[in-house]
Image (cartoon, rainbow, N blue to C red):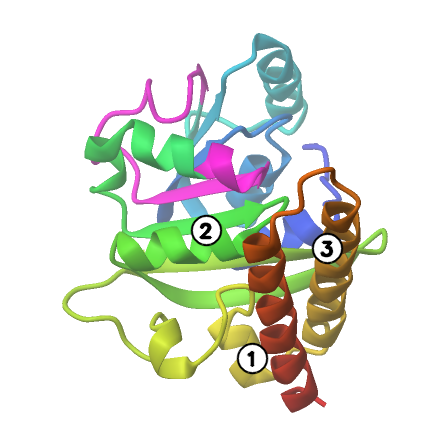
Amino acid sequence: MSKIINLSARLATIVSMVSHGARVADIGADHALVSIVLLQKGIANFVIVADVNSGPLDAARKNVQKCEIGSEISIRLSDGFAEIAAGEVDTAIIAGMGCSQIIKILEGNASVVEQLDCLILQPQESAATVREWLDVNKWKIADERLVDENEIVYEIIKAVKRSGKSDLFTSFMTLSLPPEVGPILFYRRDPLLAKLITKNIENIERIIVEMNKAKIIDNKKIDELILKKIELSGVLDSTR
């Protein structure tokens, strides 16, 4: 009997955002738990488990063996998409990394990323930077979820290819929303959105306090942060 995998709320949400019949690359897959569940539930037809470190891949192989997953999974030592061919998969999951690392991976192998239909991204911080990258690179935000796990609110973004001009969900100018606020989260009035915005405001306040302690005070940057705080406070008020 194959082993039953119990995922955390964050990982289970990622699984729920993958389209049925997808061919998935799970980048930085760690122990391959998401990949295994995608196959166990019949959501994905094929999964590539990719990690830049051999240790997690050894654990992934053991989990795959325990769960009796067959030829539908490929485990590869790969720096991002380096060992994945263009067109081999249509969906990529990149989760549990900083925004800079996620963007570095996406830009590192453009020929592979250009052939993808869907991105599911879960940055550990600064989802705003990820949203801005998606908008500039013509990806449309198709879904967004918030998950509260161990008092941390995680943002998970699903993006699909966009043709032509930006639409309401991807144009922050049209929406008058700062990129820190997911457009779909805002329109759905996600119950965790207020908590997320409040934490962002508190973080800005801490940064301002620390900047004011510096020997050379960057007043321009402080003014920008104050404006950002006012902007986020306005959105917060509108969610109540």
State whether residue 18 appears in this view.
no
Query: Quarter holding the C terminus?
Result: bottom right
Please state the horizontal and vertical placement of residue 168, each as a whole percent of the image. 34, 80
- Residue at mark 1: 186
Is 34 positioned to the left or the right of 83 in the image? Answer: right
225 above or below 207? below
- Residue at mark 3: 208
Please state the horizontal and vertical placement of residue 124, each as a whole percent of the image. 63, 44
Earlier along the polypeptide chain: callout 1 or callout 2?
A: 2
Query: Quarter holding the N terminus?
Result: top right
Q: Which amino acid does label 3 sit on?
A: Ile
Name the mark on residue 25: none
Write the start and end of the magenta stretch as one range. 75-102
10 above or below 85? below
Is 45 positioned to the left or the right of 190 in the image? Answer: left
Depth check: give the residue in front, 79 or 83: 79
Depth check: give the residue in front, 165 or 61: 165
Tell me if label 1 and label 2 are in contact, CB under 8 Å: no
Dot 2 lies on which element? helix
Q: What residue type is labelled 2?
A: Val
> Residue 184 in magenta?
no
> Residue 81 in magenta?
yes
Tell me if label 3 and label 2 are in contact, CB under 8 Å: no
- Residue at mark 2: 130
Depth check: give the residue in front, 216 or 137: 216
Earlier along the polypeptide chain: callout 3 or callout 2?
A: 2
Is 187 positioned to the left or the right of 84 in the image? Answer: right
Earlier along the polypeptide chain: callout 1 or callout 3?
A: 1
